[in-house]
Amino acid sequence: MVLLGAPGCGKGTQAEIVSQRLEIPAISTGDMLRRAVEEGSELGQRVQSIMVAGGLVDDDTMAEVVRDRLGREDARRGFLLDGYPRTLDQADTLEEILAEQDRGLDAVIHLDVPEAELVRRALARQRADDREETIKERLRLYHEKTEPLIGYYEARGLLRRVDGFQSIDRVAADLLAVA
Ligand code: AMP
């Protein structure tokens, strides 16, 4: 499954809940990259300045990260992707990676939250990459690069929409109902 939504829509929180309930790993590419930066690995050094600026890490690097992660044992029964794909090219790549593994997506869930609420939540969050300029850039890139994925997955009959502007429990219940 893929969880799709703007920065600040609550994807991370919901991914953890659904992951526990369905007993499949929640795979957050943002968390993986942040860990790489903390560890100071070669990958971390490469992506650090991009992340600080709120930019997107290049598709080839992300393909490597995701191919490796989805190939691991714990993802064999299923997985919940949070933060990938973020571009149409990444969506095509994901399809290729899953085809290599003889599987495909069951559902893509769009967690829908009004723009004003996204900005409010983002400003209330405290994280190293959450400067105001960074937040704006991340939202801009979401609209430009990631939003087209909604139509992409709708055309494939995979898209489910969940109202993300409700309590955490209500959103989780709605998510599990369509997952
Ligand atoms: P997130 O925690 O998902 O908001 O991701 C934090 C940051 O990691 C993003 O602002 C990007 O710089 C980078 N990142 C995470 N996932 C991706 C992706 N699929 N493609 C490109 N960059 C990504």
Image: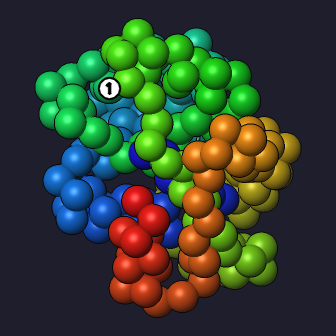
Amino acid carrying label 1: it is Leu
Res. 98 image quadrant: top left
Q: What is the quadrant of the N terminus in the image? A: top left
Where does the image place residue 126, in percent across and percent down from the top left? 49, 68
What residue sits 62% from the left and 66% below the top? Answer: 161
- Would you place residue 14 above or below residue 63 in this image? below
Work out whether residue 36 or residue 81 is closer to the camera in this orientation and state it.
81
Ligand 1, image quadrant it occupies: top right
Q: Which residue lies under the disc numbered 1?
A: 70
- Would you place residue 48 above or below residue 95 in this image? below
Residue count near mark 1 (Cα–Cα under 10 Å), binned few <14, some 14–19, many ≥20: many
Where does the image place residue 165, in percent across and percent down from the top left? 60, 83
Q: Do we see residue 48 in this rendering?
A: yes
- Would you place residue 133 above or below residue 125 in this image? above
Q: Do we see residue 146 in this rendering?
A: no
Q: Is mark 1 within 8 Å of ligand 1?
A: no
Where does the image place residue 46, in percent across and percent down from the top left? 52, 19
